[in-house]
Image: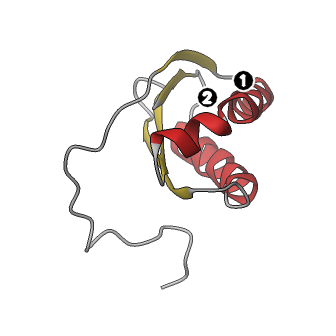
Amino acid sequence: MTTTQGTSEDMVALAAMAGETMVEWLRDLEGFEGLVMLSNDQTGTTHVISFWESKEVAERSRVARLKLRDRITSTVGVDVQETEAYDVAFAHLSSFRDATRPD
């Protein structure tokens, strides 16, 4: 999970645009399972959570993903606060719909 901080008035829209760009690139990487971006307009904070088939698969693309992260964050004018790896301890997402899909 990467946490960023920005000053844009519409961080949610900015994060959505960045997310669309990221998914276009990430979907071609081995083991990529999904991406969630959580943004707060009031604080300017965005949490970027990517999901991978396994730790090993994610590690193989780590350097390339960090370069993409740095390119996108500099383009949209946000600062990376931290990037940390987490294990998914529990998930229930059956009602979670793809926000990029038309209804």
Residue 48 position, x and y percent, is 49, 38
Residue 78 position, x and y percent, is 65, 22
At 65% across and 38% down in the image, what residue appears? 60
Residue 20 appears left or right of 40: right
Residue 81 position, x and y percent, is 52, 14
Instruction: From the viewer's side, name the closer residue of 19 and 69.
Output: 69
40 up-or-down from 33: above or below: above
Q: Mark 2 points at which residue?
A: 8
Residue 7 appears left or right of 86: right
At 32% across and 68% down in the image, what residue appears? 96
Residue 10 visible in the picture: no
Residue 10 appears left or right of 27: left
55 up-or-down from 74: above or below: below
Q: Quadrant of residue 79?
A: top right
Instruction: From the viewer's side, name the closer residue of 8 and 49.
Output: 49
At 59% across and 51% down in the image, what residue appears? 16
Secondary structure state at the residue bearing disc 1: loop
User: Label 1 is placed on what type of residue?
Assistant: Gly
Tag 2 and tag 1, C-beta contact below 8 Å: yes
Secondary structure state at the residue bearing disc 2: loop
Viewer-side label of 2, 1? 1
Q: Alpha-carbon neighbours of circle 1 within 10 Å: few (<14), some, or many (≥20)?
A: some
- Mark positioned earlier in the residue sequence (2 or 1): 2
Instruction: From the viewer's side, name the closer residue of 58 and 70.
Output: 58
Q: Identify the coloring.
A: secondary structure
Q: Name the residue under label 1.
A: 77
Residue 44 appears left or right of 28: left
